[in-house]
Image (cartoon, rainbow, N blue to C red):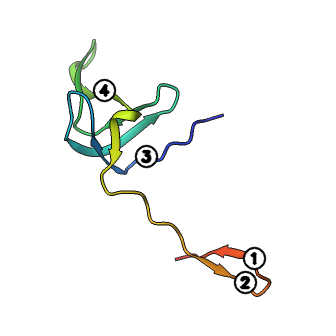
Amino acid sequence: MATKLKIKKGSSVKVIAGAEKGKKGTVLEIVTAKMGVRVQGLRIQTHFDKKEGLQKKEGLIHYSNLALADGPAPKTATKAKKSGAAKKAST
């Protein structure tokens, strides 16, 4: 079963620990097996490819070293039906 993380692809995050502490960026990829997150512009590593030569790529930052920069996503409002059951509002 996959681990559910609060940080999603495309969300803005801030590094709270490690060499990149204090920097902000956008999430490019999440690797749940390693609990790693690839953030745009952070932890740049050099990778050599025979065809394309040296390339600069973002490395993984552990999930525990990140925090959401914008705070949690707003919760969706619920509307009560006439029968009393709650239904998510589509806004």
- Classify mark 1: residues with Cα within 10 Å, few (<14), some (14-19) or many (20+): few
Discs 1/3, front: 1
Q: Which residue is mark 4?
A: 59
Could you tell me the amino acid type at mark 2?
Answer: Lys
State the mark number for residue 85. 1
Residue situated furthest top in the rendering = 50
Could you tell me the amino acid type at mark 4?
Answer: Gly
Q: Is residue 63 above or below residue 69?
A: above
Q: Which residue is mark 3?
A: 7
Q: Which residue is mark 2?
A: 81
- Classify mark 3: residues with Cα within 10 Å, few (<14), some (14-19) or many (20+): some
Pick the front one: 80 or 47: 80
Q: Percent from the top left, x then y, of residue 55?
A: 22, 23
The mark that comes first in sequence, 1 or 3, is: 3
The mark that comes first in sequence, 4 or 3, is: 3
Q: Quadrant of residue 22?
A: top left
Could you tell me the amino acid type at mark 1?
Answer: Ala
Secondary element at tag 2: loop
Secondary element at tag 3: loop
Pick the front one: 43 or 64: 64
Q: Percent from the top left, x then y, of residue 42?
A: 23, 34
Q: Are marks 1 and 2 in contact (CB under 8 Å)?
A: yes
The mark that comes first in sequence, 2 or 3, is: 3
